[in-house]
Amino acid sequence: MDALWLRADFRMDETLEDLHGLETKRIKGNFSLGAFLGADIRISERLALKAKAGIIPYAGGVDGLASVGLFYVF
């Protein structure tokens, strides 16, 4: 059984004229940690290249992220 490292409680209390409501929510989840690297490269005054990559390990494997963007300013 995995330990739940992330836990949050919040309470909502609302009154609309003569209606009143109160609700409490509890959120539980596993905490995960990842590593990411990125770079912003200005090619010219109007053109830039942005790239990033990263990994997020979890109990059954590893998720990955990779993205590249080319930005042009009008």
Image: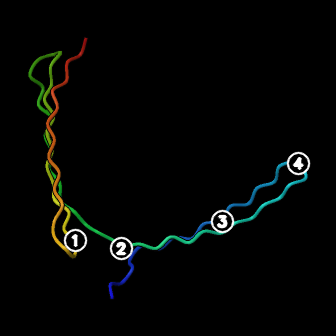
Disc 3 crowd rating (10 Å Cα; few below 14, some 14-19, many 20+) is: few
Cα distance in 3D space between marks 1 and 3: 31 Å
Q: Mark 2 — residue?
A: 30
Looking at marks 4 and 3 on the same chain, the residue that comes earlier in the sequence is marked by 3
Q: Disc 2 on helix, strand or loop?
A: loop
Residue indicated by mark 4: 17
Label 4 and label 2: CA atoms lie apart by: 40 Å
Badge 1: few (under 14), some or many (20 or more) residues near its Cα, within 10 Å? few
From the viewer's perspective, is 60 left or right of 25?
left
Query: Splitting the image into 4 quarters, where does residue 58 fall?
Result: bottom left
**Which SS class for mark 4?**
loop
**Which tag is nearer the camera, tag 1 or tag 3?**
1
Give the residue pinned by disc 3: 11
Q: Amino acid at mark 4?
A: Glu
Which residue is pictured at 83% across the width and 49% down the height? 16
Residue 64, quarter of picture: bottom left
Disc 2 crowd rating (10 Å Cα; few below 14, some 14-19, many 20+) is few
Q: How many marks?
A: 4
Instruction: Report x, y in % for residue 34.
Output: 21, 62
| Residue 4 appears left or right of 43 | right
The amino acid on which the numbered mark 3 sits, given as a three-letter code, is: Arg
Residue 38, placed above or below residue 30? above
Q: Position of residue 7 (x, y in %)?
A: 47, 74
Residue at figure coordinates x 65%, y 69% from the top left? 24
Q: Residue 58's mark? A: 1
- Disc 4/disc 3 C-alpha distance (Å): 20 Å
How far apart are the two marked residues, 4 and 1, measured between alpha carbons?
48 Å
Three-letter amino acid code of the residue under disc 2: Asn
